Image (cartoon, rainbow, N blue to C red):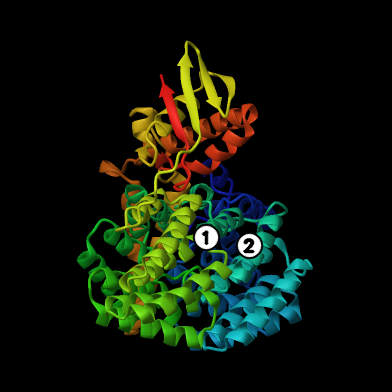
Amino acid sequence: MSPEASPEVGPEAADTGRPAGGPADLERQAGELYAAGELEAAVTCWERLYEAHRANGEPGPAARAAALVALNLLCETGLMAPVRGWLARARRLLGDAEAGPVHALLAVATAYERFLSGDPDGALGPAEEAVVLGERFGVDPARGLGRVAVARLAIHRGEVEEGIARLDELAVDLAAGAYDPLTTGNVYCELICAALWLGRYDRAREWTEVMERWRHGPAFGATHGRCRVHRAEMLRLSGPADAAEQEALAACAELRPWMRREYGWPLVELGNIRLRRGDLDGAEEAFREAHAHAWSPQPGLALLRLARGDAVGAAAMVREEIAHPMEVPWKECPPFGELRLVPLLAAQAEIAAADDDPGLAREAAAQLDRIAARYPSGALRADAALARARAALAGDDPAAAVGAARDAVAAWAELDAPYDAARARVVLGQAHRALGEDDLARLEWEAAAAAFAAFGAAARAAEVAALPGERLPPARGPVASLVRDGDRWRLGYDGVEAWLPDLKGIHLLATLVAAPGREVHVLDLVGAGVVEGGLPVLDAEARAAYRRRLAEVEEDLAEAERDHDEARRTLAARDREYLLAELSGALGLGGRTRRTGGTAERARTSVTRSLRYALARIAEAHPELGGHLARAVRTGSCCSYVPDPVVPLAWHVRR
């Protein structure tokens, strides 16, 4: 049902569970609900406020409410068709009225609608207008988000230093408290996204730390969840991997899938982290769910295929994505331009080298070099250098590969990205081996194996240790014992014994340390049937909101078809497909609400909590052993115990 067809505000609203009251009450409720993260209820308040002002013959206030609906839908759903519909309603109500605060809101919403719809030329004018009007009338979302839009558009034009300078100025203003909490949270997130696009990880890390401190104050809406995704992104670079996965999982829980396309964002991040950890099944689960929420899982899914040994399938996936990138209308991924090709080209170079296609690897490396020259950053230079090294090695030019791989190692090390530096070290070692420099190859591979293990990538550490001629000489390390004695466990290490209670986490730990390096799925650790039931995929309010949005999309689609606007029709059809998929996934046979199984995720949470508690008790009894276990025990959908590959700790376990 479209907003124009919604029932008028009246006493019956209280019986329907929908927001009720006069205009002042509705506006207050909208702010409170949004601050609490209740998106659907907050937007419903703004919609009913629009209806109330229209019924009272108040076009100006009704236009303001419509503009706020558009801005909230833009920031929270990524559904451009409903945004366009609400912007049109507001403009019709304003007519030729003199510019005012509502025009500032309309300008910033229009700028981002055009930007996210892939029309940078159409976005620039409204973005500049938003800044001017926002400053004139004191409209924080317009002046804050408008400044970000102007900066990001400059970056896309290749004016990188100008764009970064604008973002730096804005960051100073945010730190000084120059904007309201709603604007501050959204702009911080935008700053980090822009830095990550460019591979400016130093700024991304700095701004993430600032946002993390800020979010414990008056954070609004989905700010907590978005900040968690950024923290997961930073931890994916620096490690440890288990902390990165926990942040990504928490972000998935906070950024609910209910009408938030960006739910695919933390899912892809979760998949990338699990891929690095070697949890291939968990990674595939996350990537597939992201795809189901209309978010591109590439190149992660292609690299997963490569990890499973399917180089041909991986190459086909990346080739298709480069030729036809999934149009994702969200600020976390570049919606257009060359920057969105960077991870795809880096993956293509890796896959082509593995598939013995040096020509394609060289082509991908050349494109990365060109993009890195236009958008200079340490990460883009590192990606391009590693791609060149892979191409040279595949093309039987190991001498050239050595120089390029060294450049990549140095660049990633400078960015505090040990996993990526280790990947480059593996290629560098292969180049040395091809030149007959076995000692140098062994040196690089030893460093890579240690870095992978410290990061939490047990499978990669084992893979490097198994490279030809690389097996490290066995080293006699210390021995620890874990022996069950009745309802207690005896822990022995370095001549010290301690007694521990019969905790669930100790049982789990005994299973892991008895098989170093082996990954065990959480359901195998705790057994099936740990949890029952599940959670509703959508509640009644969310389903009603979906249907309202779907009606608005249909109106936009019909208008686009009537005007023969193919670009707009394509965008609206994409929104419709997304909403229909979400609704069909939420409803089972006969329209009954479907429930999630939840078993795997609850088992993951239970195992992680139990292991951490047990490790904390061990650290109290023996801090040195506790520190070793904290580094060596990996949790997630699969758990493992991965000791230092150079000086491993042997275990004697009896249960």
Quarter where residue 273 is shown? bottom left
x and y, in percent, of residue 287 in the image: 35, 56
Look at 39% across and 62% down and name the residue there. Answer: 550
Residue 322 position, x and y percent, is 32, 76
Picture quadrant where residue 424 is located = bottom left
Q: Residue at x 64, y 54 (%)?
A: 26
Camera sees residue 554? no
- Residue 208 - label: 2
In the displayed structure, does residue 44 sit left or right of residue 341? right
Neighbor class of circle 1 (other Cα within 10 Å; few <14, some 14-19, many 20+) is many
Q: What residue do we see at 46% from left, 41% from top?
A: 648
- As shown in the figure, which amino acid type bears the numbered disc 2? Thr
**In the depicted view, which residue is nearer to us: 651 or 168?**
651
Provide residue 471's location: percent of width, then percent of height.
Answer: 35, 52
Q: Nearer the viewer, residue 123 or 41?
A: 123
Q: Is residue 348 above or below residue 182?
A: below
**What secondary structure is found at the residue carrying circle 1?**
helix
Residue 563 is at least partly visible in this image: yes
Residue at the spot x=43%, y=85% of the render?
369
Where residue 113 appears, as percent x and y from the top left, is: 50, 76
406 and 528: which is toward the camera: 406
Could you give the CA–CA distance between mark 2 and mark 1, rounded to whole angstroms? 10 Å
| Outermost residue toward the right in this view | 176
The circle drawn on residue 233 is: 1
What amino acid type is highlighted by mark number 1? Answer: Glu
Question: N-terminal of the two: label 2 or label 1?
Answer: 2
The front one of 575 and 147 is 147
Q: Which mark is residue 60?
A: none
Quarter holding the C terminus is top left
Does residue 255 sit above or below 597 in this rendering? below
